[in-house]
Amino acid sequence: MLTETVTTKSGKSAFCFKGTLDLPESERVCTCGCRMQKNDSTSITLRHLPFGGSYTVLNFDKVQLFCPKCKATKMQYVSFAAPGHRMTAELYNYARDLLARGTYTLKEVAELTGLGRNTVKDIDLQRLKEKYTIDGEKLAKPEKQAVFLGIDEFKLHNGHKYATHITDLHTGHILWIQAGKKKQVVYDFIDFVGLDWMKEVKAVACDMNSDFQEAFLEKCPHLKIVFDHFHIIKNFNEKVVAPVRIAEQKRLMEAGDTEAAESLKHTKYILTSKRTTLQRKDQEAREGRIISKGSTLFKEEQRVRKEGYEAKYDALLEENKLLFTIDLIKEKLDNAYKLTDPVKMGTAIADIVWDCMHTGNEHFEWFGRLLMNHHDGIITYAVYHISTGKMEGINNKIKTIRRQGYGYPDDEYFFLKLIDMSRVDYVRNPKSHKFCD
């Protein structure tokens, strides 16, 4: 075998191993039983596993055989070549193993293996189809029976393009993805898993998208729809706390109370936080918690947590009646979501609605109507303590994967990649690769 060092178009060094390929006697036998003869040969180059920081290729002659009896021809079989690719089976499996880890992008795998990005994508797509589809045409049905489901939409492309994923809340596995965020997504999912499978599902966690709620209950009336704490609080913070703070600041400025108006600046975080959170931050400040380490190299000073969050919060509540109402409703909501009796939770929510409707403020009244219109889904949380927290985590992963890949125009490949992502176990602190003594 002859070894040469060559330079690739990208400027990296590569080892080229030149040799001969043995032709076993069994391969010379034609289907008609006659012994075949060598007719021609062609030079073949296969990419192989990288060695250190260099790529490697194998170069050898591949023989064409000819049968003098039936005039048939065939090419010599290369047992170590990956089917359909100009690479060895070892390199093909190495690329698949890297892709299966879920931590490398197509570009990174291409750089590690010396393959083209499109070739790496083809390998990954084939891997995903083998794992999650039937003959590459239909998505494989869930392996396990789910009891609680979650459904949420996510941004697919720039513009008003969305897709929806349905997830098993116990395992975190994505069971279904489809473009759009309408009822048809739910209808297609139920047709996919079947009504018998859906009979074992007890509840579905979702945001306050009425299309999802109506579609599930239309096909499976036994299901319970759950609106979790997160979306209620999010609506309260964005549609009540933020506009009330801005309106109060504007009112105080117009009334000439500049000092009171200035005190409301930069208070959004304090007003939307729980009192226990503010107390925790004050405690961290007393303990000297370091937020950011300083750097002499970049002339940055060390930042330490400052105290006074709870005191400023109490001062704001004393100065403004509406802000005091915000604090009251936040506390009541927090206590309501700790209840395990739907009747008691319904009473607590009704109390909050009464408080909102008697403030005379349009933003509080809007929130009161929101609670009334979604009353059943809210109090169901007392029975099934499920939330869309896992869905929001998956949505963050989806954004990360899309950014890492600089976008995926191929929706089929992107959806399969998301399904695969949901099945890769996350390890927060992986063990060291140090060898044991």
Image (cartoon, helix red, strand yellow):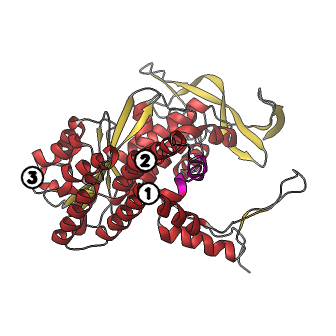
Which range of residues does the magenta coloring cover? 258-269
Q: How far is the residue under mark 3 from the one under mark 2? A: 39 Å
Asked if the residue under mark 2 is in contact with the one under mark 1, i.e. CB atoms within 8 Å, the reply is yes
The quadrant in which residue 153 appears is top left
26 in relation to 409, above or below: below
The residue most toward the front is 256
First of labels 1, 3 by sequence position: 3
Q: What x and y, as percent, mark residue 225?
A: 20, 55
Residue at image coords 48%, 69%: 275
Secondary structure of residue under mark 2: helix
| Type of amino acid under label 1 | Leu
What residue does disc 3 label? Answer: 221
The numbered disc on residue 68 is none
15 sits left or right of 320 in the view: right
What residue does disc 1 label? Answer: 323
Residue at image coords 69%, 66%: 305
The residue most toward the top is 71
Q: What x and y, as percent, mark residue 73?
A: 48, 22
260 sits left or right of 231 in the view: right
